[in-house]
Image: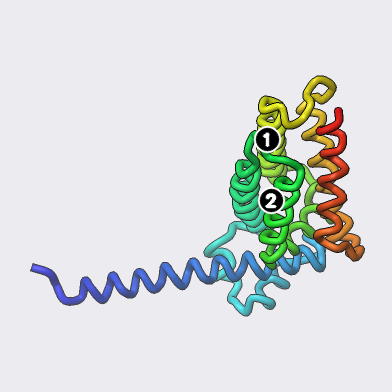
Amino acid sequence: MTFSFESGMDERYEKKRKDGRKRYGQIMEVALVLFAGKGYHATSIEDIIQEAGIARRTFYTHFNSKEDLLLKIITHQLRVLSEFIDFSLNRISGKADRDEIIKITIDSTKHISTLPEMKYFGRMMLGEIIGMRGVFWDPIEGFMEKMKGLTINAINRLHDSGVINKQNTAPLVAALCMIGGIKELIYTALVREEPMALETTIHTMVNFFLQGLFDA
């Protein structure tokens, strides 16, 4: 036998959970935009509360502090970015030529650049957060280590298939140069806001790196 009020309780509970998840995401979105534009240190919890249109107790229902909020933003966005880059780099087969790599890079970059939060996240991270240590550093370091590993694996696949010459190329050094170059391009575009044509930039970047890899 089922009591009639149980269904109603389940529905109310589920609605409350959905509303909570929606509010959680809303606070993170508002905070990300504020951190990217105003700066993490210059943004107060009160700024976030007012911009999100919520009560203070609602903020503390989801986050312990501003630091906790930033850590959750960083962890979430890096997970999303990591999964996509993993997928994109694994599309590069051992027999990929320069044109195929350029196409995959352009397609992937276009996809990432259509996500509004990535613009704010990149600006926030490279403008201020990347230089901070403490609790924020663990997910950042984990992400950078994963990117290094994925890039090395892609280079090794091209090495092993004979597509690029590995005699004079150290995969680790090549990976670090690529990651560093990409980070500088993102900084120039998002933080310094210098105009850069997407496809021209990618063609130049990929050709620059692959010239050394293919002709090493």
Q: Is residue 117 left or right of residue 179?
A: left
**Which label was assigned to residue 15?**
none
Quadrant of res 40: bottom right
The answer to whether residue 105 is above or below residue 59 is above
Quadrant of res 153: top right
Q: Which residue is mark 1?
A: 154
Question: In which quadrant will I find the C terminus?
Answer: top right
- Considering depth in this image, is 104 or 134 the residue closer to the camera? 104
**Which label was assigned to residue 104?**
2
Can see residue 138? no
- Taking the spot 88% from the left edge, 62% from the top edge, the residue there is 196
Q: Residue furthest top?
A: 167
Q: Amino acid at mark 2?
A: Ile
Disc 2, SS: helix
Q: Amino acid at mark 1?
A: Ala
- Considering depth in this image, is 12 or 173 the residue closer to the camera? 173
- Taking the spot 64% from the left edge, 34% from the top edge, the residue there is 94
Q: Tell me residue 80's x, y (percent).
A: 60, 53
- Considering depth in this image, is 22 or 134 the residue closer to the camera? 22
Q: Tell me residue 177's x, y (percent).
A: 84, 36
